[in-house]
Image (cartoon, rainbow, N blue to C red):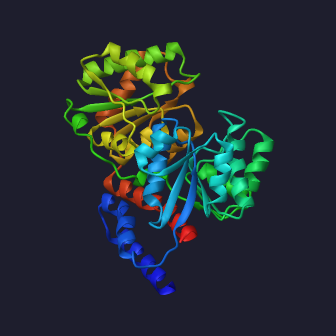
Amino acid sequence: MVENISLRSAILGYLHAHLDDNRLRCLAPLFYGRLIRGVDLKPMQVILSGYYGFGNGGDEALLATLLQMLPAHVSPLVLSANPQATTRQYQVKTCDRNDSIRVFQAIRQSQAFIWGGGSLIQDATSAFSPVYYIGLMGLAQGLGLKTIAWAQGIGPLQHRRNQWLARRAFRGCTAISVRDPASAEWVSRWQVPHHMAPDPVWSLTATPVPWVQELPSPKVALVLRSHPQLTPPRLENLTTAITAFQAQTQTHLLLIPFQATQDAEIAKRIRTRLPKQSSLVSLTNPRQLKGVFAAVDMTIAMRLHGLIMAAAAGNRCFALSYDPKVREFMTAHHCPGWDLDQIPDDPQVICQQWLDHYHQGQGLSEDEIGDLTRQALIHQQVLQKVLS
């Protein structure tokens, strides 16, 4: 048994090291699953807890990547706000995250529990949100499950109570991976061992979307969301600027809502100004959502995973930051942009900045994208070590 597990690790390491095609590298676990089919690994039910089932493209992409990275013998059970949709999308077992009795039963019947990536432990949007996730983690730890804080983006944590609760939860984890230096600073301050790697969505396998590829080129993607700092005057200035930008570049705009409840209204409003020069791209499949950006030349985005997916496809990126995680992306990848409250008041100035980046800016190189994709697989190694 030990010999076979060592062989499995050697095979997987070889595949990761020698498959130069990023897509093949991401498929390495599938090869691994086939190659060790004869190894007697006991089936393991694992709870996946995250912001799933809310129709947020970034969090669904994290779920898709987590499912892609899980070892073959793991049977995932996803806590979802929309269990039927999650089952339909990923063909996995689900449980209504708001049904406390069923959630307790599911955790009690499982062998491991995973916080499934993203900004779960933060109290900027809600003081209660981190308490929900920490409570589930505490229950799992109390019941003796293996627990993983996977690909975490920690903070802001403004309330001391939440800081104390988070520190206690992270200290009880079997393993931890974080996705950025700010999160690593939190766990380092709490003196908790951890691994840091780029957001795992860098390694999500993308699926092409033929009808998007057939739209006129060149293409520019726009990923905006509602936010208190995106005031009506600022949105109007951005809309005026994008209209002028399109006229001068003759690009086709892809308006991409990552979460319909927050993004669709803005996308539809902008499209009324450019009905023949733009398309609304509404997708719920995260692999397809990432695949859209393969046909895009430049992306202007507020959402972190819109920027990650675009950068992974080699797009020139321009960020509009509403959150520290977007600012982290801008710093890490030398991405130009503004915080929302720093957007110029003059649409001509906005347009000119976009024109300059469109004509003179550069996306990440293939080597840079390959390095980020490889480094993101550290999150997979954490899963394999704990769950094997």
| Left or right for 309, reference 214 | right
Count of numbered badges drawn on the protein: 0
| Left or right for 260, reference 314 | right
Residue 35 or residue 317, whichever sits in front: 35
User: What's the residue at 22%, 39% (across, down)?
Assistant: 210
- Compared to 131, does 76 lie above or below? below
**Residue 30: quadrant of the picture:** bottom left
Position in image of residue 179 (x %, y %): 55, 52
Residue 261 or residue 144, whichever sits in front: 144
Position in image of residue 343 (x %, y %): 50, 23
Residue 333 visible in the displayed image: no
User: What's the residue at 51%, 57% (across, down)?
Assistant: 76
Residue 237 or residue 293, whichever sits in front: 293
User: What's the residue at 47%, 66% (across, down)?
Assistant: 71
Position in image of residue 321 (x %, y %): 52, 33
| Left or right for 127, reference 287 | right
Residue 193 visible in the displayed image: yes
- Compared to 281, does 161 lie above or below? below
Position in image of residue 206 (x %, y %): 33, 49
User: What's the residue at 69%, 53% (across, down)?
Assistant: 137
- Compared to 107, does 336 lie above or below? above
**Residue 368: quadrant of the picture:** bottom left
Residue furthest out toward the bottom: 3
